[in-house]
Amino acid sequence: MAILNEASKRRAARGSRLRGWRVLCLFAWLLVVACVNFVPRQGWDPSAGPVVPHDSFPADCSLCHEGDDWHTLRADFVYDHGKETGVALEGAHERAGCLLCHNDRGPVQQFAARGCAGCHADPHLSRLGANCSDCHNERTWYPREAIAMHDTTRFPLVGAHAAAACFRCHPGAQVGNFAGTPAECSECHQDDFLRTANPNHTQVGFSQDCEQCHLPVSWHRARFDHVASFPLTFGHGGLACGDCHTTPNVFTGLSPDCATCHTDDFQATTDPAHAAAGFDPTCDDCHDTRTFERSSWPHPDGFALTFGHAGRRCSECHVGQVYSGTQSDCASCHLDDYQATTDPNHAGSGFPTDCQECHSTATWQGAVGEHPESFPLQNAHQRACTDCHVPGNYSGLDPSCVACHLVDWQGAANPSHSAFNLPQTCEQCHDDTTWGDGNWQHDFPINNGDHSGLDCFDCHDNPADRLQFSCINCHEHNQTDMADDHPLDEVPEYVWTTAACYACHPNGDD
């Protein structure tokens, strides 16, 4: 029995030693595993990502790495990706770490062949197509030309809509879900519709189609299309609804008559006093919506308000707010002007007081009275009356030219009118457009050959009578030659006289 107990003790001791060795071996194994998991294998830090396959890399590690570890690249390391691989890295791709594309997932070519989807998960769940470059580029992931591209949808982004963040209308925008967003105004603006009190959209029963009145540029100052019978133009167009529709949220039954809103204006007007003068309170007879001042009341056709008459106040002609029975003759307003005029003196000359015979409403100066048809005032003759008429005397004036132009006639030197004894009827050579060279036409065309360019006195050499002319006075030394040129058997009528010369040679030619 004792032997058996001793044997049991020895077996228990061996089992205890065996369990200790097992624990020790397990600890050693755990230590090895820990070393494998936490100590970089050959200096590679697992936090840098998976190991890049180097099967095709050069055997000289120092071309890229520094001496003591595998994860530190040389400071002067430069790799021209475009030159070495034919694929240039641009934008954000240029700044990306090599391991983002080159890792132990497999050959990078098979992922590049898929385009953007090879590296980038589609946040839009294929709802916007596979061509990422339609909206994105390599420099930034933020979508470009989003507003212009949105214009191709059924809801172009205009005004305030263009400035709104995508998620304001697309709740799934953060996860790339833009599908199913409604385009109706009320889907986004229902709260605005319900809380609007001026006017109360719900109580009045307005449509929830906001764009009937509002613009996406500005929410306020709606552009409600007023009834055609009362268009809101100019001064009426900038008013709030409550300015005319004073009963809150009641927009029917309002009279379109001007007096509905403008009775106070009508009664307060004093120039002229509308109420005292018995004017009709239909304001649009005289006023329009552009401006309440300077009415456009149509004056009777018998006295049209044109030019100088048009810009005056009613009270300038209608004294004492009396608008009927006012005389329409000129002297009723302009008698003082008539009597004060001295150039010419209207009263002293007995001019009629009907001013419109000479004056117009365009300008008071420069009267255009009708001159007698026997002497029309045209061109240079359109002068002040006193240039021809002695002040106060406008009848019996001699209409002959010399009555005004005798000094001009006497001073004319080329030719000398007095020396030639030319007639004093100036209109034979001159007109009233310009006094310059006269347009007198010679009775016969002695203006060719040797006769061209002669002075008047070369032919008209008789001081006693300049109208007479002579041919033989110039040709007196040629009488023999002329006789030889005119043999009597050929020119039997030849005579050495001026009259005979001109009879055969009226234009001076041979």
Image (tube, rainbow, N blue to C red):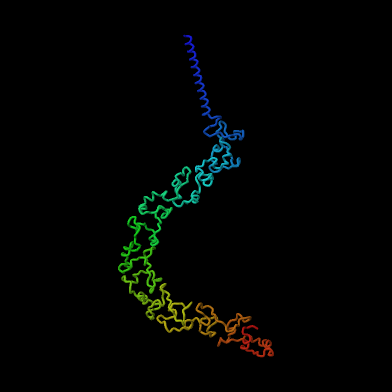
- Position of 55 compared to 366: left or right? right
Percent coordinates x, y for residue 122 in the rendering: 51, 42
Above or below — where is 69 with respect to 455?
above
Above or below — where is 429 with respect to 187?
below
Above or below — where is 363 with respect to 472?
above
Q: Residue furthest left?
A: 276
Along the viewing direction, whichever of 128 and 485 lies nearer the viewer: 128
Is residue 207 visible in the rendered structure shown here? yes
Q: The C terminus appears in which quarter of the rendering?
A: bottom right
Percent coordinates x, y for residue 400 in the rendering: 48, 84
Q: Residue at x 49, y 48 (%)?
A: 146
Along the viewing direction, whichever of 366 and 26 lies nearer the viewer: 26
Along the viewing direction, whichever of 254 and 456 lies nearer the viewer: 254
Is residue 233 visible in the rendered structure shown here? no
Above or below — where is 417 with respect to 182?
below
Percent coordinates x, y for residue 398 in the rendering: 45, 84
Q: Residue at x 51, y 78 (%)?
A: 435
Q: Residue furthest top?
A: 2
Count of numbered circles in the view = 0
Percent coordinates x, y for residue 427 in the rendering: 51, 82
